[in-house]
Amino acid sequence: MEWDLAQLRALAAVADHGTLEAASRELHLTPSAVSQRLKALERAVGAVLLRRTRPVTPTDAGRPVLLLARQLAALTTDAESVLESAATARPVVRLAVNADSLATWVLPALASVAGEVRITFVREDQDHTADLLRDGTVMAAITSQRTPVQGCTVESLGAMRYRPIASREFAARWFAGGVAPAALASAPVVVFDERDRLQTERLEEAGVPWGTAPWHMVPASTQFSEAVRYGYGWGMLPDLEGRAWDGVDLAAVPGSCLANHDVALYWQQWSLQTASLDAVAAAVRAGAAASLRQQ
């Protein structure tokens, strides 16, 4: 079939912004005009592409069409950026990145291309960022998954080392007799969110079932480390995070049953090549080489 670029743009705008009204503002059209383009595209495809929820979500049939829409948008915007000098012609790269990478090495790594490329960061756990590539939500992802998503390339970036850290006051109170399973079963722990397995796995390796120890949930990288600093509990903190306070590395305590943990990270991106995506990939590659542990 022949694809209508305006209809595909409407699909991507609604998926990105969540509602017809928000998409219409982005496209400078009326909501009725956006709706008509969507319906025409669905008639051409022969399937419903978006669930009309708030925000809207792509259907199974809509995901490959949405991926196509974003790939075509990337190609056309890159071409327009060469022909036009206006800031609005700058290409957009949607990048999925885990919170700790975003809070440490990714922002400085991409500063060199921020003047030429508009970057939309989509924060997601490194174990799930590749899912956003599958449904076309993002063009590239920093992920822990080494198997490439269909239609994508993959390369190793290096590893982030995490250490079990606690404030000195917390360690003196809860681990005075050593970092042993019995102490870990009662000492509070800080977790990032429901998907954060770093602390859970370290406890299970020590023989402490998850849910035995009390926990606090702090779903923001800076505030997570602050919670550890203020003694809410112990937590796994990345080496790259600049800590201006003198915490205790629990893995370094003699006889500790906690260990450091390396999270391997990979760069996955669409096999489709554009100048903007190549520039972002090169900047990420250089930043990772300078900041991550290379094996």
Image (cartoon, helix red, strand yellow):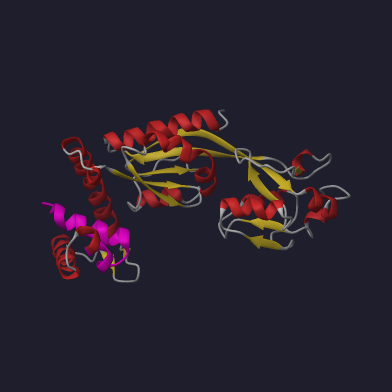
Which stretch did the figure color magenta? 1-24
Residue 198 placement, left or right of 20: right
Task: Residue 249 in the image: state x and y as whole percent.
Answer: 74, 42
Residue 36 vertical placement versus 69 (above, below)? below
Task: Residue 271 in the image: state x and y as whole percent.
Answer: 31, 38
Verify whether residue 16 appears in magenta: yes
Q: Residue at x 19, y 43 (%)?
A: 76
Residue 266 vertical placement versus 44 (above, below)? above
Task: Residue 236 in the image: state x and y as whole percent.
Answer: 66, 47
Residue 2 placement, left or right of 256: left
Quarter of the figure with the C terminus: top right
> Could you tell me how many numbered marks the image carries?
0
One can see residue 148 in this view: yes
One can see residue 61 in this view: no
Q: Residue at x 78, y 58 (%)?
A: 187
Verify whether residue 10 appears in magenta: yes
